[in-house]
């Protein structure tokens, strides 16, 4: 019983979705994101950098992301009321200008230590442009792709199991109390 | 390879849950092993723990990180979940040890009725029928290997959860007739089980052969992810097929052969269902039950008997040390509040009290007891006052209630919101300084701990929260107290003062007015007072006369305190949400007010004083009218209002944990800055960057919801128990409790709405690396 209750705590959609995978310069760069990126919630963006010739994963590259908001939108940097800190990122921001931000991606921030990851919190709905910059020694390459950010309509939906828990326990308690009565023995 | 091996994704909730499961099992197994070592040998314990570890390993180890890139790693994970963890868990015969490991009352009153419930027994019998188990396992295995279903689980976390639940539940059922955990009675003869396993192996072979020999990639996700180790997606798929085929088949074949050998061995007779094996085990059940009931109930847990910690808590010096440590922190807050920058997120006066102290106080109260009153620095000046030997008077009789302290608590909530105390370090500093002065003045002029009992608003907050604490200062043996003539716990003696809040321990109940100072423990010449475990919240059901408090049903001041405590929890959090802030500002603009302070004052006072009074009075009247019990509506008001305290405590905890999570780095920033200002460079120079929460927003939301769930459930349970006190018939009890249960549910819904709103960030800052 306990195992069933605990299982949902863990299971997740592995690495998320592959946003883009291309051979660039001497590397093959693959960008992953959480399966659902929604406005105002933390999401993981991660990158796997491999050597083009051997598919070997590079673990000592320098990876950073440049995030550009959807065209025509204005980032609300100074908004004091928000679900997360006023910056658009949760990771380490190197610079931020005109709504664009550069974030360092690190292997320590990823549960899969082959990947370079940075948690981001994108405050606007729309197609964000993500440019992954990779540098390894004297070699460098970049890969640009789009992250579709949706509305956080599913936040309440994610809570349904935890909201159903009191109902379930109250129902079980009601049955328990009924089983203590003489009627239940009939 | 090193990177792969370090890719652990340890889930704290799962790890904690499995640890709790393991502890319950070990506790139960230890008792059962002592009673019947033949039925519960050591191998059962080892097997169960190995099952838990393999389950944990499957979902926390690098396998999980790799399974998104390699189908073969994913397959190993599934083999562990389907064919390794479930049989190991079942071999531990977990049902009886887990039941025995639970608290006795929970197992007897909570779970035992279900075990005897005939519809549930019928359903269990149906589900554990070998044919049903076989069909469920094989159909689950086939269904989830259909490419569309497998892809769905890879892409969606929700469906991935469903997949894992299906696998583990089907596997536990499948291995049930094979392992036959005690006290299961076999339904199929032993000779049939090898065929049962071989049948499942055929299905497994067909699936694995499909994977191994397919000439195209069956699951498109693996064709698009990067390939590791120079392996192609197709070769990875073939490897996954081989893993499923060979170790998977071995998992079926080894028990099949073992059972066949056992069946064919000369010592084994033809076992028919429900015979030999079952008969032997069945006869063990009543014997075991009889032995288990003979085990006498142990003394309840007493924290003061724990080696080292118990002595530490008893020592007067250790309390003084804690108080001095808190005093130094308070002085730091005052100094920084007055002299430091007036930005709350980088000032000790903005961070220490409002981000850390509040959260730690509530967590300590809910997890243990009122230890922050024990370490309170405000009572240190009391000692100075006492040493001044001024003439001390008794606290004025007219003020011997909670009304004065309650008024101060309401004023505090009002000032906090209207003047934004959290964002004004200098105001916080002055507040703390004045707190010291008032505590000194009152305790210097009046006897005992008058300040704690009748004045301190923080103390009242903590007294009310400690109704839900799991520890209580209590006498160990009432018989010893019955023969005591000196009553040192109350009066004190030449070595030690007695209780400052006038609590006579034999007639003390619960934690109300108890500051955990442990003076009574030190004063008792019989060493008869402990820090004893108590069921959280149950104290509110007790209406017997309490020392220095009286009956709860006659204390309107305590009722008002409880209601303010509960409603303030929700109102205080609601004021931080964007919709409420916007609505308040809009209302101020419509009324042409220059500042929203007036509106805030009106709304806040209405929310924590007027609304609770009106709602609780209405609930008491409706409750009285519906149930027609012989007690007054006032008594119902006083007693049922106290039952809402767990919900309020849960809301405070959920709210403060949010701030602790989002501002957990702020303390370091403020300390670093304060040190730099003082000319002490402990760290490298650093700036202040954006904060990253300790855990993600989703995890915080789930934690907050679970905390509020616990508060609601405890409140509803107390309401039900109290209703049964007044109305022994269930129907009458339901009428009596309906308004209170409805009120608790509405507050719970309001709390969830608050959690879902954008929240104002208070005191957030973090260092740049």
Image: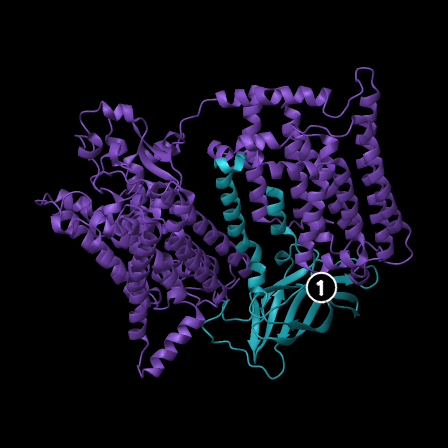
Chain colours: A cyan, B purple
Q: Tell which of A121 and B83 is nearer to you.
A: B83
Q: Tell which of A40 and B547 is nearer to you.
A: B547
User: Horizontal and vertical percent for residue B503?
Assistant: 23, 38
User: Horizontal and vertical percent for residue B633?
Assistant: 27, 52
* A66 sits to left or right of B196: left
Badge 1 sits on which subunit? A
Q: How many marks?
A: 1
Q: Residue at x 61, y 39 (%)?
A: B119
| Vertical order, A95 against B167 (above or below) | below
The quarter of the rendered structure image containing the C terminus of chain A is top right
Q: Residue furthest left?
A: B391
Q: Is residue B682 visible?
A: no
Q: Residue at x 34, y 79 (%)?
A: B588
- Secondary structure at badge 1 equals strand
Which residue in the structure is indicated by mark 1? A17
User: Horizontal and vertical percent for residue B347?
Assistant: 37, 63
Q: Is residue B441 visible?
A: yes
* A134 sits to left or right of B692: right
Q: Residue at x 39, y 50 (%)?
A: B735
The quarter of the rendered structure image containing the N terminus of chain A is top right
User: Label 1: how many residues lie within 10 Å, few (<14), some (14-19) or many (20+)?
Assistant: many
| Vertical order, B611 against B501 (above or below) | below
């Amino acid at each position: 019983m306990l195992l069933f209750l605990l299982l949902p705590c863990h299971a997740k959609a592995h690495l998320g979705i592959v946003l883009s995978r291309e051979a660039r310069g001497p590397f093959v760069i693959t960008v992953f994101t959480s399966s659902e990126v929604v406005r105002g919630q933390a999401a993981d963006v991660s990158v796997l950098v491999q050597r083009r010739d051997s598919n070997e994963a590079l673990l000592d590259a320098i990876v950073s992301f440049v995030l550009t908001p959807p065209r025509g939108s204005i980032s609300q940097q100074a908004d004091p009321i928000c679900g997360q800190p006023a910056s658009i990122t949760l990771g380490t921001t190197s610079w931020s200008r005109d709504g664009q931000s550069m974030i360092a991606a690190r292997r320590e921030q990823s549960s899969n230590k082959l990947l370079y990851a940075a948690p981001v919190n994108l405050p606007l709905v729309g197609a964000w442009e993500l440019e992954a910059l990779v540098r390894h020694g004297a070699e460098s390459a970049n890969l640009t792709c789009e992250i579709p950010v949706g509305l956080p309509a599913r936040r309440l939906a994610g809570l349904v199991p935890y909201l159903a828990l009191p109902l379930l326990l109250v129902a079980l308690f009601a049955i328990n109390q009924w089983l203590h009565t003489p009627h239940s023995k009939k | 390879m090193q990177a792969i091996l370090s890719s652990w994704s340890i889930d704290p909730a799962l790890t904690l849950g499995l640890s709790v499961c393991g502890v319950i099992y070990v506790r139960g197994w230890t008792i059962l092993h002592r009673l019947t070592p033949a039925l519960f040998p050591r191998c059962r314990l080892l097997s169960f723990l190995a099952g838990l570890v393999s389950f944990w390993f499957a979902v926390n180890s690098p396998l999980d990180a790799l399974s998104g890139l390699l189908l073969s790693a994913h397959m190993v994970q599934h083999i562990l979940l389907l064919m390794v963890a479930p049989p190991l868990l079942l071999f531990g015969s977990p049902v009886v040890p887990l039941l025995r490991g639970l608290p006795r009352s929970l197992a007897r009153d909570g779970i035992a009725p279900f075990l005897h419930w005939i519809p549930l027994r019928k359903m269990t019998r149906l589900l554990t029928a070998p044919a049903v188990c076989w069909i469920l396992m094989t159909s689950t295995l086939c269904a989830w290997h259909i490419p569309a279903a497998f892809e769905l689980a890879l892409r969606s976390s929700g469906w991935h959860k469903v997949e894992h639940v299906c696998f583990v539940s089907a596997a536990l059922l499948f291995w049930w007739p094979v392992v036959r955990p005690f006290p299961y009675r076999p339904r199929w003869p032993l000779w049939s089980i090898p065929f049962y396993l071989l049948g499942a192996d055929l299905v497994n072979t067909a699936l694995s052969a499909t994977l191994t020999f397919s000439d195209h990639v069956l699951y498109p996700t693996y064709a698009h992810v990067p390939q590791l180790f120079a392996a192609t997606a197709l070769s990875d798929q073939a490897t996954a097929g081989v893993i499923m085929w060979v170790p998977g088949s071995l998992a079926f074949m080894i028990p099949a052969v073992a059972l066949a050998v056992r069946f064919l061995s000369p010592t084994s007779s033809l076992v028919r269902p429900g015979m030999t094996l079952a008969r032997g085990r069945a006869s063990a059940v009543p014997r075991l039950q009889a032995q288990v009931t003979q085990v006498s109930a142990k003394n309840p847990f007493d924290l003061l008997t724990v080696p080292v910690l118990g002595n530490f808590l008893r020592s007067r010096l250790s309390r003084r040390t804690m108080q001095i440590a808190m005093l130094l922190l308070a002085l730091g807050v005052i100094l920084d509040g007055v002299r430091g920058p007036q930005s709350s997120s980088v000032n000790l006066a903005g961070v220490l009290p409002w981000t850390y102290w509040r959260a730690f106080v509530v967590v300590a109260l809910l997890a243990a007891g009122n230890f922050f009153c024990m370490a309170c620095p405000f009572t240190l000046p009391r000692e100075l006052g006492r040493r001044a030997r001024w003439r001390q008077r008794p606290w004025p009789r007219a003020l011997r209630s909670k009304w004065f302290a309650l008024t101060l608590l309401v004023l505090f909530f009002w000032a906090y919101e209207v003047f934004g105390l959290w964002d004004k370090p200098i105001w916080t500093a002055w507040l703390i300084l004045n707190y010291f002065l008032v505590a000194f003045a009152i305790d210097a002029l009046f006897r005992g701990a008058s300040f704690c009992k009748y004045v301190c608003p923080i103390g009242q907050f903590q007294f009310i929260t400690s109704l839900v604490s799991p520890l209580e200062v209590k006498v160990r043996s009432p018989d010893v107290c019955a023969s005591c003539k000196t009553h040192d716990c109350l009066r004190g003696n030449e070595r030690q003062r007695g209780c400052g809040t006038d609590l006579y321990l034999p007639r003390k109940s619960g934690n109300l007015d108890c500051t955990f100072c442990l003076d009574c423990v030190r004063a008792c010449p019989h060493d008869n007072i402990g820090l004893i475990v108590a069921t959280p919240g149950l104290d509110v059901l007790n209406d017997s006369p309490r020392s220095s408090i009286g009956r709860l049903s006659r204390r309107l001041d305590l009722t008002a305190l409880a209601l303010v405590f509960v409603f303030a929890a929700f109102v205080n959090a609601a004021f931080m949400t964007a919709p409420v802030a916007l609505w308040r500002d809009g209302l101020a603009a419509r009324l042409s007010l220059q500042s929203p302070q007036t509106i805030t004052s009106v709304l806040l006072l209405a929310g924590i004083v007027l609304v609770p009074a009106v709602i609780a009075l209405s609930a008491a009247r409706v409750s009285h009218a519906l149930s027609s019990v012989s007690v007054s509506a006032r008594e119902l008001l006083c007693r049922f209002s106290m039952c809402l305290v767990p919900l309020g405590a849960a809301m405070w905890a959920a709210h403060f944990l949010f701030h602790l999570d989002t501002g957990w780095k702020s303390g370091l920033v403020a300390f670093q800055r304060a040190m730099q200002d003082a000319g002490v460079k402990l760290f490298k120079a650093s700036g202040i960057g954006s904060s990253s929460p300790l855990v993600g927003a989703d995890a915080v939301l789930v934690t907050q919801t679970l905390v509020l769930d616990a508060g609601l459930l405890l409140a509803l349970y107390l309401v039900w128990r109290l209703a049964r006190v007044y109305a022994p018939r269930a129907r009458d009890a339901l009428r009596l409790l309906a308004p209170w249960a409805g009120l608790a549910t509405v507050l719970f819904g309001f709390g969830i709405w608050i959690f879902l709103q954008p929240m104002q960030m208070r005191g957030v800052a973090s260092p740049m690396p």
